[in-house]
């Protein structure tokens, strides 16, 4: 069951939104406003969440909510934070980071839709990361999603700007799960609160992951899941058959679905990170998703 839709993913991260083509985020703001309105026109029951920003940047959030007026279009705002692996601040800075966002959130609920700690260097560090993250964030934000339940297979390519040349920053992406890619649980899994949300990105036709995700979430008693429907994949042959299967299999869970990635044929340049040439087309896609999967 879809209970929330997050519009885009880390727009202030050039790996997901090429802001050289939209340096003042005007296209992004227009796209989100139109998409949020389209979703609200279709259903009053789904929470529309402004894209999880990363890095945490109150000035960027204030630009979107206040200057561009997105506070009047969305129901909640989201941020991502990974202090152990990719951010230059420690776990204990979480309360200050949250407060910096609260000051500009214009009273909207604040969600952390992706946070985590990799086991890249040491599995005991990940155990500490799970414990400390929830200790610091509980009661300070409305939702927390741990990224992720499963490690990425090493055969996968991670969407970053410079890939392997980023060194350990790149390879840490493969170790953020609480279950190894061979299906063996890591020690940190025992410390994940069962009322926590889980964020798991699913690639096109990744059926084995969908089945494992549904199985393990049921086994662990986890209910809240954040995943994705790619606008770019929506344009593939047989895309609806794939998404129908994925959404049917995940229907028992409370879903926050992130909609993002521009079809190359619709971008200012042919790349999933490009702003669309026509922001209204993203709104049309969002309306299609709601009509098909919100019951």
Image (cartoon, grey):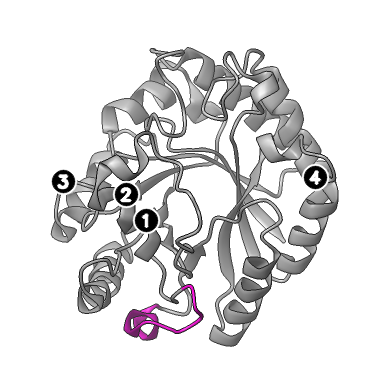
Is there any visible trace of residue 258 in the rendered image? Answer: yes
Q: Which residues are magenta?
A: 181-192
Q: Are marks 1 and 4 in contact (CB under 8 Å)?
A: no
Residue depicted at x 30% and y 62%: 137
42 sits left or right of 115 in the view: right
Question: Which type of secondary structure does the marked residue at label 4 adopt?
Answer: helix
Reading the image, the residue beneath label 2 is 170
Q: Toward the viewer: 39 or 200?
A: 200
> Compared to 227, does 18 lie above or below?
above
Q: In 3D space, how far apart are the residues under numbered discs 1 and 3 (Cα atoms)?
A: 16 Å
Comes first in the chain, label 3 or label 4: 3
Classed neighbour count for the residue bearing mark 3: other residues with Cα under 10 Å, few (<14), some (14–19), many (≥20): few
Q: In 3D space, how far apart are the residues under numbered discs 3 and 4 (Cα atoms)?
A: 39 Å
Q: Toward the viewer: 227 or 138?
A: 227
Question: Which type of secondary structure does the marked residue at label 1 adopt?
Answer: helix
Reading the image, the residue beneath label 3 is 88
Q: In this rendering, which labeled residue sits more in front, label 3 or label 4?
A: 4
> Compared to 41, does 172 lie above or below?
below
Query: Does the magenta portion include 184?
Result: yes
Q: Are marks 2 and 1 in contact (CB under 8 Å)?
A: yes
Q: In this rendering, which labeled residue sits more in front, label 2 or label 4?
A: 2
Is there any visible trace of residue 253 in the rendered image? Answer: no
| Label annotation for residue 239 | 4
Comes first in the chain, label 1 or label 3: 3
Comes first in the chain, label 2 or label 3: 3
Q: Position of residue 75 (x, y in %)?
A: 54, 41
Residue depicted at x 68% and y 73%: 211
Comes first in the chain, label 1 or label 4: 1
Reading the image, the residue beneath label 1 is 173
């Amino acid at each position: 069951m879809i209970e929330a839709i997050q519009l885009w993913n880390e727009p202030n991260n050039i790996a997901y939104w090429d802001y050289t083509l939209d340096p003042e985020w005007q296209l992004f703001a227009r796209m989100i406003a139109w998409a949020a309105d389209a979703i609200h026109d279709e259903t009053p029951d789904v929470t529309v969440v402004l894209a999880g920003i990363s890095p945490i940047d109150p000035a960027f959030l204030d630009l979107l909510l206040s200057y561009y007026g997105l506070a009047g279009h969305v129901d909640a705002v989201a941020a991502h934070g990974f202090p152990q692996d990719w951010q230059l601040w420690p776990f204990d800075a979480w309360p200050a980071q949250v407060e910096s966002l609260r000051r500009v959130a214009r009273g909207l609920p604040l969600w952390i839709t992706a946070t985590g700690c990799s086991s890249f260097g040491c599995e005991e560090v990940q155990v500490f990361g799970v414990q400390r993250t929830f200790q610091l964030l509980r009661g300070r934000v409305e939702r927390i999603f741990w990224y992720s339940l499963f490690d990425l297979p090493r055969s996968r390519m991670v969407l970053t700007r410079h890939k392997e040349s980023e060194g350990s920053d790149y390879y840490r992406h493969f170790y953020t799960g609480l279950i190894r890619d061979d299906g063996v649980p890591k020690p940190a899994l025992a410390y994940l609160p069962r009322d926590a949300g889980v964020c798991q990105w699913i690639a096109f036709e990744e059926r084995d992951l969908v089945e494992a995700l549904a199985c393990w979430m049921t086994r662990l008693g986890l209910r809240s899941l954040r995943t994705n429907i790619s606008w770019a994949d929506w344009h593939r042959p047989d895309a609806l058959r794939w998404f129908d299967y994925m959404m049917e299999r995940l229907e028992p869970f409370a879903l926050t679905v992130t909609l993002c990635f521009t079809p190359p044929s619709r971008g200012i340049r042919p790349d999933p990170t490009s702003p669309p040439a026509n922001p209204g087309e993203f709104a049309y896609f969002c309306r299609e998703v709601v009509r098909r999967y919100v019951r």
